[in-house]
Amino acid sequence: MQQDGKFELSRFCVINNFTVIGIANKILHHFVLNHRPTKIVSYADLRWSEGNLYKKLGFTLSHISAPNYWYIRNGLRYYRYGFRKSVLSKRLETFDENKTEWENMKDNGFDRIWDCGSMVFVKTYADGIGE
């Protein structure tokens, strides 16, 4: 995602038991040279990470987000955004506008699971010029 030189790094994944020394730094450097960001924001899921990679790459911890939730039903997980109360009447078999989002979801056989929140990291560049 890009907006006025601001980008979001939504995923950085690795394969277990496979190592390429310095690959994250090399990929980031290539990106910066080619896209000249003024700001990059990314997230470390507190279930899996302490954010060490972002710290090594020169990102600064902005804040820790509150825990987030998903809905589950029949072994499938659904992101909560698709089940905002404003759209539930179109998505659920049973809907009562006097009930909360959560009450309506329970009435339709959904349960809710929570994560641990995320650390939000930011790296800024002066005028889009990389280090």
Image (spheres, rainbow, N blue to C red):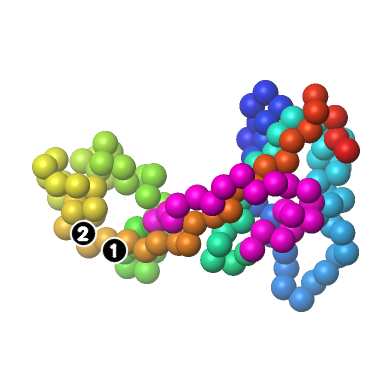
In the rendered image, which residue does mark 1 sit on? 111
Q: Quadrant of the C terminus?
A: top right
| Rendering coords of residue 59 (x, y %) | 73, 47
> Rounded to the nearest whole Å, what is the CA distance between mark 1 and mark 2?
6 Å
Residue 63 visible in rendering: yes
Residues in magenta, as a range? 50-69
In the rendered image, which residue does mark 2 sit on? 106
Residue found at the very far bottom of the displayed protein: 17
| Rendering coords of residue 122 (x, y %) | 67, 42
Image-quadrant location for residue 19: bottom right
The amino acid on which the numbered mark 1 sits, given as a three-letter code, is Asp
- Label 1 SS: strand
User: Left of 122 or right of it: where is 80?
Assistant: left
Look at 16% across and 58% down and name the residue there. Answer: 107
User: Left of 91 or right of it: where is 27?
Assistant: right
In the image, residue 55 lies in the stretch drawn in magenta:
yes
Q: Report the front residue among 74 and 22.
A: 22
Q: Report the front residue among 57 and 111.
A: 57
- Label 2 SS: helix
Residue 10 visible in rendering: no
Q: How many C-alpha atoms fall within 10 Å of the one at disc 1: few (<14), some, or many (≥20)?
A: some
> Is 64 located above or below residue 128 in the figure?
below
In the image, residue 110 lies in the stretch drawn in magenta:
no
The answer to whether the residues at label 1 and label 2 have Cβ atoms under 8 Å apart is: yes
Look at 71% across and 27% down and name the residue there. Answer: 5
The amino acid on which the numbered mark 2 sits, given as a three-letter code, is Lys
